[in-house]
Image (spheres, rainbow, N blue to C red):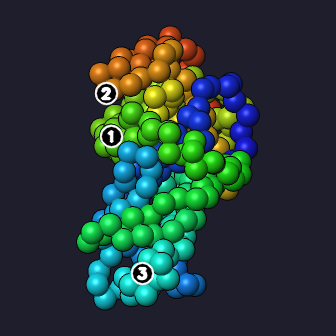
Amino acid sequence: MGDSHTWAAVPGAAQRARSVLAVAWSCTVTTEGCPEEFTGAHSVTGDGRVLLRAPEDSALSAAALLAPRGELPALLEFADVAPVPVRNRIRARLRLAGRFTRAGDTLLFQPMRVVLRQPPGAVVITPADFAAAEADPLALAEARLLTHLADTHPDAVERLTRLVGPDSLHGAVRVRPLAVDRHALTLRIERARTDGDVRLPFHAPADDIAQLTERMHVLLAQAGSASCGRALQRQRTDGDG
């Protein structure tokens, strides 16, 4: 990691954290020093609280039943995994410290401390900013969009490398779509022993799939008029041979 590239708008930390939470399918819950994995068991309220449906025989359910005043301190951890297979596939980790209370048949988690960890480091987000933020408008469609791009249009990914500086492409053996948000498409450039990410900014934010389609067509048109990414093609040929 650590490539230096042209600046592009990026989602704020609170929005990025809400995006991680919105798409996460599983989480690790730690209470009283006991971690448990839950898959497909949680949902998120509009203000970022987490509703968890814990099995009756889980340690979490037992601890919540015995919690003094009905409040159970807990730590929730979520991992943001790149939809397309790449090296170093974890893009971010979200840690929420707070407490559970009962809400009917479910447990309601109120975050009191929010930490988002992603390159280049960790960011502490205030609970108020976290509650007020919204997930990126493309977050729920991102996995489908990126896998479609990687699996169905590898030629388009190849063409987009023409927008990447030659220094970043030096030694590249593979380029894969890593992420997309309303501001940009991010490519992961893999070399023999290292990798780096490049953001290709859109000319304007995209708030839905139709707008994203138009932004991608503009990027591809720009790439079509740019010089050919010979370094990447040569490295790929050498690596495949």
User: Please, which residue is most extreme toward the top here?
Assistant: 225
Disc on res. 209: 2
**From what the image shows, is residue 109 above or below residue 29?**
above
User: Please, which residue is most extreme toward the front here?
Assistant: 69
Which residue in the protein does label 1 denote?
141
Q: Residue at 55% of width from left, 23% of height from top?
A: 201
For the residues labelled 3 and 2, the Cα–Cα distance comes to: 41 Å
Please provide percent x and percent y for residue 135: 44, 40
Q: Is residue 156 visible?
A: yes
Q: Residue at 41% of width from left, 23% of height from top?
A: 206
Which residue in the protein does label 3 denote?
64
**From what the image shows, is residue 36 above or below residue 232?**
below
Please provide percent x and percent y for residue 162: 55, 23
Please provide percent x and percent y for residue 24: 40, 57
Disc on res. 104: none
Q: Is residue 234 visible?
A: no
Amino acid, disc 1: Ala
